[in-house]
Image: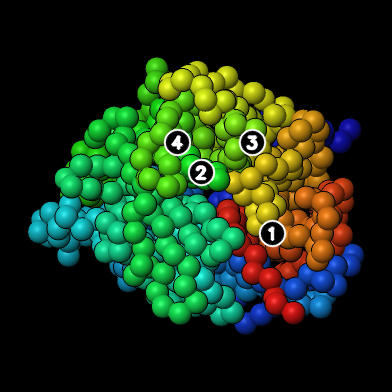
Amino acid sequence: MAAVAEKLYPNCDASVWLRSCEEEVSEPLEGTTTGELPPWLRGTLLRNGPGSLKVGDMRFDHLFDSSALLHRFAIDEGHVTYQCRFLRTNTLRKNRAANRIIVSEFGTKAAPDPCHTIFDRVAAFFNPGEHMSDNAMISLYPFGDEIYAFTEGPIIHRVDTVTLDTLERRNMTDCVALVNHTSHPHVMPNGDVYNVGMSVVKGRIKHVVVKFPFTEKGDMFKSARIVASVKPRWTLNPSYMHTFGITENYFVIVEQALSVSVAALMKGLINNEKVCSSLKWNPDYETHIVLLSRTTGLEVKRFRTNTLFYLHIINAFETDGRLVVDLCAYKDAQVIDAMYVQAIETMQSNADYAEWFRARPQRLDVSLDAPNLTHVPQKLIADIGCETPRIHYDLHNAKPYRYFYAISSDVDAENPGMLIKVDTKTGETKTWCTPNGYPSEPIFVPAPNAKDEDDGVLLSALVWGGEKTQSVALLVLDAKTMKELARTTFDTPSPAPKCLHGWFLPTNS
């Protein structure tokens, strides 16, 4: 009798996150297309994410530490090509020169660098931007006609959107004295860019909102300025923030129970410690939703809700005198622990692993006339796991919306590699999946002359588990129906890792 294959729990092939690209694709690679791409779909899908966990004989300990790998899918008249290249950061250069990890990362303590003197370590205290890792492997955002790779440290990198060359390195500490910032700035319809970070203002640590005014000619960074600020709830332990919200009248800052010890962070810079050692989870603290006026820059009001952890705000908006904030909420911050390499490798022997990833879309809805510190209940939008949410951003960011799209965070689902569409009005969900396939964050691209919010397509980068390691595809779905329209599959010269976030640049007709 043939042996019955053991079904693993969670039924998830997490090796897609742990692959290391060993050979870049500099020249556009041709693929094989099934289905039919919409003839109007023309442009460039850029992606960013973990590219290699290896440096010499060493390996990074956390997924967030993997060397940044950029991906490019160029779409033109039904034809698609693919490229991938490593982001040329100072950290990558130093590690490759030493053939070992000599720069500490979010979750990895570096090996001692014999060339790193005590004076260098003390200098890191005063100029963290030049001594922390600049491995920007989270996201990509436009500043005018330029594209920059982001992480939460103060360094961003300009990227050539055709060759994927790393062109320029900017230190936000020099620009607006940002010690850190979120990986997800907001790009407004007029081209202005806003981001939230931590800065030292008149000797005090503050959460600040920075505006980068759009300009067709000139430097958006030279004209950057702080337009709002607020003291952290805990003076020397500001809340950790990966995203923030923006509405018609307010910047929305969600102060959660995961905080950053400034003292531990500075001490870690001197002692070459991993960054996550400065994080502290405070389960007894409620979550605060802080509103900063877009006109005055001052705090207007704050509301309270139960303790939660979040990485991504789905959308925030005002409607009929009410504030609505939708986010992907976890009960605690263990999802960060779940992204340690060892935790990923041993997930099938961890009975709690799936719960660590159990994010749910929650809505916070409160009258703007409610008294300060009013408690806001969390309303479940849909009972489905979701992460890396995207909306019809150009028309509905900071405005009422109905639909969002995401990847599954339920690693124990029958098909953990799902793409999800959620109707925030009805709670209805639609999904797409393919056997052993693992798509990335879905990016919505509206159809020309679209009449409905979901009239368009979703673009996602697709990889496979199992032995199909050297393959990546551009996936195109109908956003209304979640049915597959087309995919173009590429055979890559080395393993293709799963990516995180990206941006679509349409080709102007």
Name the residue carrying label 4.
291
The residue where tag 2 is placed is: 249
Query: The residue under label 4 is which amino acid type?
Result: Leu
Amino acid type indicated by mark 2: Asn
Cα–Cα gap, marks 1 and 4 = 35 Å
Query: Which quadrant holds residue 77?
Result: bottom right
First in residue order: circle 1 vs circle 3: 3
22 lies above or below 29: above
Q: Earlier in the sequence, mark 1 or mark 4?
A: 4
**Position of 445 compared to 226: left or right?**
right
Left-right relation of 170 to 371: left
Front position in the image: 77 or 206: 206
Residues at marks 2 and 1, CA–CA distance in whole angstroms? 35 Å
Considering only order in the chain, which callout, 2 or 3, is on the residue closer to the N terminus?
2
Q: Position of residue 52 (x, y in %)?
A: 50, 60
| Residue 207 falls in image quadrant | top left
Disc 4 is placed on an element classified as strand
